[in-house]
Amino acid sequence: MRDGPSCYQPVAAVVFCRHRQPEAAKTRNPHLNMSFTVEERGNPNSPSYRLFFKNGEGKYISPFHDIPIYADESQNIFHMVVEVPRWTNAKMEIATKDVLNPIKQDVKKGKLRYVANVFPHKGYIWNYGAIPQTWEDPAHKDKDTNCCGDNDPIDVCEIGSRVCIRGEVIKVKVLGILAMIDEGETDWKVIAINVEDPEANEFNNISDVQRLKPGYLEATVDWFRRYKVPDGKPENRFAFNEEFKDKDFATEVIKNAHNFWKALICQQTKAGELNCKNTCVSVGDSPYCCSADEAKAAVGETCPCGKEEPIPSSVDKWFYYERK
C-alpha cells in the first residue's frame, strides 16, 4: 500500500506516561514516567466520566490522533493506549466521535456497558486497548476477510504479566493478529506484549505465545466468540479458520490501518461522525486543527471530576453456555 498523504505534521516518538491517575490507581507507579498526563472529568462509573489526555507540555491532546503510532519505528515497536485493564468489566473506549477523543464507558440503551463474565472468563483476560493513529476504514473491504472495517482504531490485547492502568500509554511488541468478524465488520485483534515486561525478550512471534502460554490463544478466541451472547447476540465469527496470523502479517495490517488514518486526517476520506480534531498533527489551515485554547474550552464544558458511583452487583454474575 502507498505511504499515504503527508498533509500532517508527524509527532516525534516520545515516552508517554501519566500524571493524574484514575480513582483506582492514585498511588505512584514506578512503571510510569511523568511526562504524559491524564485528567479525569465527571463521576467514575457514570455516563459523565471522561479521561482526557495531555502531553508533556500540559497541552490537551487526542489519544486517537496525536499520540504517535510508533514508539520505535525502526524496531516496529508501537504505542498502545490502555482502555481496559485486565480482569475488569467496564467497556471503556476511546470516544472517536467526541472532541479530543477522551476515554469513556460505552453506553447501550441508556445503560453503561459491562462485558459479561462468560465462564470461565472474568472480565477482559488481557490489558485491552488501541494503537493510536490507526483506523479500520468502513469503506474498505479487506481482501482476506471480505468485510469492511469497523470504523475504529486497531484493537490490541496485551498479554504481559502486569495489570496496566486505564489511560496508560505503553510500548508494545506485536506478536500476531486475529481476524474477528463482528456483525459483518472486520475487527482485527492484535496480540502484543509490553516491551518492559520481564518476559518480553522471550516473545517474538505468535508461536511463542502458543509455546509459553499454552491455552491463552484458544481462550482468546473463545472470549471473543461468546462475549456478546449474554446480550442476546449471535457468536462472532473469524477469518482464517480461527487461526492467528504471525507478526509480519500483523505488522502489515497495522501499517495499512495507519495509511487509512493518514487519508482520514488529510480529508482524503470522509470522516462521517468521527471527530478528527487534534492539537499536534494537523497543519494550521486544516479544519481538524484544534488550538490549545479551543481544546481547554472543550474540556471545561464537561463535568468536573466528582464522586465515584457504585458498580452494579450484576457485573459479577457468571454466564454459562455450551460450546457449539
Image (cartoon, rainbow, N blue to C red):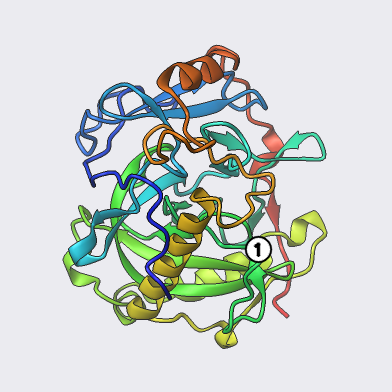
The quarter of the image holding the N terminus is bottom left
247 sits left or right of 260 in the view: left
Residue at the spot 50% in from the left edge and 74% down from the top edge: 178
Q: Is residue 303 left or right of residue 284?
A: right
Residue 175 left/right relative to 89 = left
Looking at the rendered structure, the secondary structure element under dot 1 is loop
Residue bearing the label numbered 1: 138
Q: Which residue is drawn at 37% across and 51% down?
A: 80
Left/right placement of residue 113 relative to residue 30 reads right
The image shows residue 205, relative to residue 270, as above or below, that is below
Q: Position of residue 36 (x, y in %)?
A: 29, 31
Q: Is residue 206 visible?
A: no
* Count of numbered circles in the view: 1
171, above or below 186, in the image: above
Q: Can residue 275 be seen in this view?
A: yes
Q: Please tell me in which quadrant of the rendered image residue 324 appears.
A: bottom right
* Residue 67 lies in quadrant: top left
At x 62%, y 70%, the residue is 140
Q: Which amino acid does label 1 sit on?
A: Pro
